[in-house]
Amino acid sequence: MLLHIPRILGAQELSQARRLLQRAAWVDGRSTSGEQAALAKNNEQLAEASEENRALQQLVLAGLERSPEFFAATLPKQISPPLANRYSGAHNTFGNHVDSAVRFLRNGAGRVRTDISCTLFLSSPEDYEGGELVVEDTFGKQRVKLAAGDAVVYPGTSVHRVEPVTRGARLACFFWVQSMVRSDEQRRLLYDMDLHLRQLRTRIGDEDPAVIGLTATYHNLLRQWIDL
């Protein structure tokens, strides 16, 4: 499932994020890549140990925690600490690759199975040319370029790339989610059911027997599929 999730960060938070990135030190993006991905990667990345990176992580994680849409789509068990990247000038592209199955965290802090890949856009589309995230999977080839503050989530198994940036700079956060429900197909079914249940509650209320029954079915399916 590929899903656009709007407004993870608001205007004030985006301004704060951009101030952090303006004063930050950038390093070679290949420092956090697996062997295969490093061959295709040509971008810059915010230094993981930097004060700016830690502040940006707190900002992004707070935005994710506020988003019911993100929770419904990903059912997160663990989220890797968000990182930031920049595509501009000579460091402007990332060729076709698949993310590593496991993300090992800094300083022995554990590991995250990368069920879901996530990109949160920090630059407005008009600020740069090119830079589309291209994701290829069973849903076909999708080209993604979203408003600043919006995120896209998609299966970690997908082949994807970032097209060359030919003008300006593309700034984004990226991270991975280990879901409580490992199967992408099962997550999609649960997300669809949750989406329609929310619409029904708005129309007929929480106390309607059909809403109660479907809510029970949702949680019983989640109980059957969940991995805690």
Image (tube, rainbow, N blue to C red):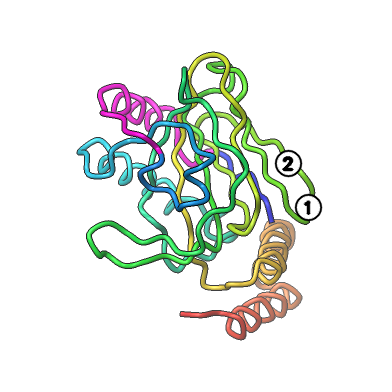
Amino acid marked by disc 1? Phe
Q: Which residue is mark 1?
A: 139
User: Residue at left 59%, top 27%?
Assistant: 131
Which mark, residue 142?
A: 2
Horizontal side of residue 15 vs 214, given as left or right: left
Looking at the rendering, the stretch of residues picked out in magenta corresponds to 7-29
> Was residue 111 drawn as part of the magenta stretch in this picture?
no
Badge 1: how crowded within 10 Å, few (<14), some, or many (20+)?
Answer: few
Say above or below: 76 vs 52.
below
Q: Quadrant of residue 47?
A: top left
Kind of element beneath mark 2: strand
Say which residue appears at 37% left-offset and 32% top-offset. 13
Label pair 1/2, CB-CB below 8 angstroms: yes
Report the amino acid beneath label 2.
Gln
Q: Using the numbered discs, state the Cα–Cα distance from disc 1 to disc 2 in whole angstroms.
A: 8 Å
State the image coordinates of residue 57 (x, y, percent, origin top left).
33, 45
**Where is residue 182 shown, x and y percent of the image?**
58, 72
Q: What residue lies at 25% left-to-right and 35% top-to-bottom? A: 52
Out of 19 and 176, give the one closest to the viewer: 176
Residue 208 vs residue 55, the one in the foreground: 55
